[in-house]
Amino acid sequence: MLDVLKDSNQQKLTAKDFSSDQDIRWCPGCGDYSILKQVQSVMPELGIPKEDIVFISGIGCSSRFPYYMNTYGMHSIHGRATAVASGLKASRPDLSVWIITGDGDSLAIGGNHFIHLLRRNFNVNILLFNNQIYGLTKGQYSPTSELGKKTKSTPVGSLDHPFNPLALSLGADATFIARSIDREPKHLKEILLRAERHQGTSLVEIYQNCNIFNDGAFSTFTDKTNKKENSVYLEHGKPLVFGAELDKGIVLDGFQAKIVSLNDDNVSMDDLWIHDETDRNKANILVRFFEDNATDADARPRPFGIFYQEERGTYEESLSQQLQQEIEVKGAPDLNKLLAGGNTWEK
Amino acid sequence: MTLEKENTQVKNVLDKVTILYAGDSGDGIQLIGNQFTNNTALYGNDLSTFPDFPAEIRAPLGTLAGVSGFQINFGNSAVFTPGDLCDVLVAMNAASLKKNLSRLKERGTIIINSAGFDKKNFRLAGIDPEDNPLTNSSLEGYKVHQIDITKLTRENLKESSLGSKERDRCKNMFVLGFIYWIYNRSLDSTIDFLQRKFKSKEEVLEANLKVLKSGYHYAETSETFSNRFEIKPAEMEPGVYRNVIGNQATSLGLIAAAHTSGMNLFYGGYPITPASDILHELAKHKNFGIKTFQAEDEIAGICSAIGASFGGDLATTASSGPGIALKGEAIGLAVMMELPLVIINVQRGGPSTGLPTKTEQSDLLQAMYGRNGEAPLPIVAAQSPSDCFEMAYEACRIAVEHMTPVFLLTDGYIANGAEPWKYPTAEELKPIALKVREARKEDDEPYLPYKRNEDLVREWAIPGTPGVEHRLGGLEKDKESGNVSYDPDNHQEMVNLRAAKVNQIAKHVPQQELDSGSMSSKLLILGWGSTYGAIKTAAQELSNEGIDVAHAQIRYIHPFPENLGELLSNFDRIVIPELNDGQLVKLIRDKYLVDAKRLSKVKGQPFHAQEIKNEVLNQLK
């Protein structure tokens, strides 16, 4: 499927063409660099002229992103990138619109706009940089920080139950839900391509390491020693297999997902859960591979990839159709007729 | 159907009449008010209306809190206000009489639905049944006509298959028919209206038509009124007129501006009283390509408009005080990004939720200063229902030509009020000079988003235009490149530039003129916005009484017209009536160092002309 996208690329641009002349001001070692690099390298493969691409962000470390892209862009206000992008996409369905946001920006101050964007299903892409911390304000806990998190604002531990961003998105009827991570550039790039291809709102949660205020938050999924034990990479039509030796699988027993060993003679590949991106029920179970403590022996691995995807009409398509229909019903616009209204008299 | 007029009693010819229709919220008062208004407009009178209703959709039946009123002043010459006191009060129940009797002139006429004056209604209105206003002496001195409208309506609909509640709902049509007869009117406009409204509900249509005609005939045959009255059509400037409500005029102004500028109209908003009718009106005209976006909240309303503006649309949003407060941060973003945006505040009583359905002008300083940082933007204000059209149009023109968010201030009074409007044709509208940046050719200089022209206006490059890709945002901008800049001198310069750019707009708005009086008048009444009608009426009456006062109404509030200071310097005395605690007066004193006096009213009600006259006489003592 990626070949289709590549073939459509007429522009012959390179990643460099998408890099602006601004100095990047993220902290050295920040996971944002890797994400920026993948986004810039994906852009030439989309086959979209760069003047038709717009990056809209809110406020936070990640939201500086548009300044580094040589496309159209807007660094808007805290939490509102989703709302700005909604208006832009409604007005300009022809543009490729990318929203850059963080866990604080989209799930705390911007939580409302976030869920409403998902239900409306504008054809835009949301890249949610989740570092489970407030970085730009120097280290307070965020809506995705784990319970009991000790930060500057919670010296004896946070009391907040964290959001599960993908479960939240599924609950808001998102039509494309995926997760990737800054340290897996190939995977990230593939997910970004799929996100752009999806007609509708594509939500991509990207685990991103903040090496200053929350270093190692995702080391469970990045450390070479154990990442394969703790993560499962989803591929449509393929069984859920993981582990350093790819010797573990997941079976679905009713609504319960269970880990099985493929070394067990009683278990074969055919018994495993086959990933189906279009199955909402399975997606509902999959997004819940989240609450487990990774150090527990029976912890389910954290899934990466596309959890769920469905086709549903986009808001801007329906809007364009409605405007067209109204012309058919009420006739072409006639300002003089409108100004005169129904009843006039002469003096 | 046209009813015969020949066989009627002698007509009394009057110059002006004010009628106040009052009843329970569920009595259909606003509907008959609007019907009478349209009929009056078509008849050729000049008119002004004041709908006044509770915030609750179904306020407790029969109580004072549930009273809904609709006042109309119409005449054979220019009418500028809905009238201070009324000549005729229609009271559908005890509460509506109790609440409005003080608004009736001495020897005025009261038309009473006696069915609304039973024990229950007295209890709900807090009236001691022993002290029945219909039988005690409290209505002495008024001409009282008691009719059991409810009973007559029921008798009319004996044969109808409608339920009793639906039948009773027709009683407002009886009143309307009755009043139509008294004022010698044709029923045609209302018959047309009912036929359209109940196209698919034949029973309801039949019932309403029957009761409407029955009210008309009852007035004719009952001899309740021995005379009919006629108010001759008004002498008005020649032209073609229509009736228009303020919020409707605002919407038409936006549509017209989009048409003239060749832009697509985008409206992002969230329902709020009394601004929602702008959203409703725009949503009716989607064949004009208007994109109305009912957002999840006020913030998303304006942010979606900012997104649409970035995309090249004529972007607008409307709200009232509480919603505008929520939009504050986003307005600052639009100031920083210097994108065109029209923000309409249909003001209502505040603070907080305040008085949602009542009028006030108390958000002027919010519009002027209600943002963090130094964030100046132009402010214009409409002075009457039809002026909402022109000022909405002007707000769009200034926004587009000067690349800035613009505030349009109206208020509940003119937003819901109606008046005849000599509407323009599309060809008569002032052009709007939309300039957008074209694609950059290889030899062109690099695009500098914040480079300014002689009016300090930056160049607008819209996504989709090759070679001029750029990034905007809320961080301070370098004065030319638009790149993020923390340079202290650059910030100072940008603060100065943003202010100078707005001030520069004064060169592109009309000079301030006197509405009446002369530069040598003893006193200037200076108003803004919806106080226009009351001030104009007061000034006219004073002038008729031989008191020489001048009147000026400011529509361009920020920046003020260039000549305003000079104009003010002609007057020893200046009075500024405002429906707030004194806001324009602060701006005027601050800018021009003149000793303007305030006349403040904050009751959720418009000024009576008499209140303004009293203050002027007081100042001239």
Image (spheres, coloured by chain):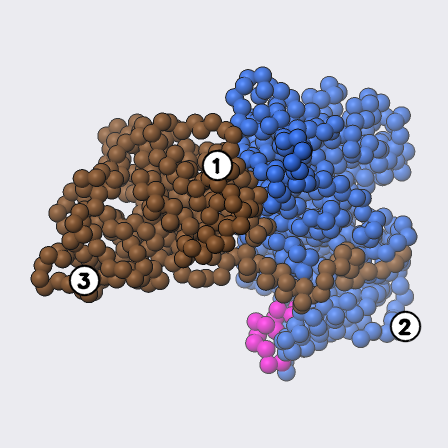
Chain colours: A brown, B blue
Identified by mark 2, the residue type is Glu
Which SS class for mark 2? Answer: loop
Residue matched to label 1: A16
Residue matched to label 3: A269
Q: Which mark is residue B6?
A: 2
Residue B115 visible from this viewpoint: yes
Does residue A229 belong to the magenta stretch? no
Identified by mark 1, the residue type is Lys
Q: Nearer the viewer, residue A169 or B43?
A: A169
The segment highlighted magenta reads B160-171
Q: Give how far apart the Cα atoms at labels 1 and 3 are.
A: 44 Å
Q: Position of residue B528 (x, y in %)?
A: 73, 35
Q: Are marks 1 and 3 on the same chain?
A: yes
Query: What residue is at 25 percent from the left and 40 percent from the top?
Result: A222
Q: Which mark is residue B1?
A: none
For discs 3 and 2, the disc positioned in front in the rendered view:
3
Q: Nearer the viewer, residue B226 or B490?
A: B490
Q: Position of residue B359 (x, y in %)?
A: 64, 43
Query: What residue is at 18 percent from the left and 42 percent from the top?
Result: A226
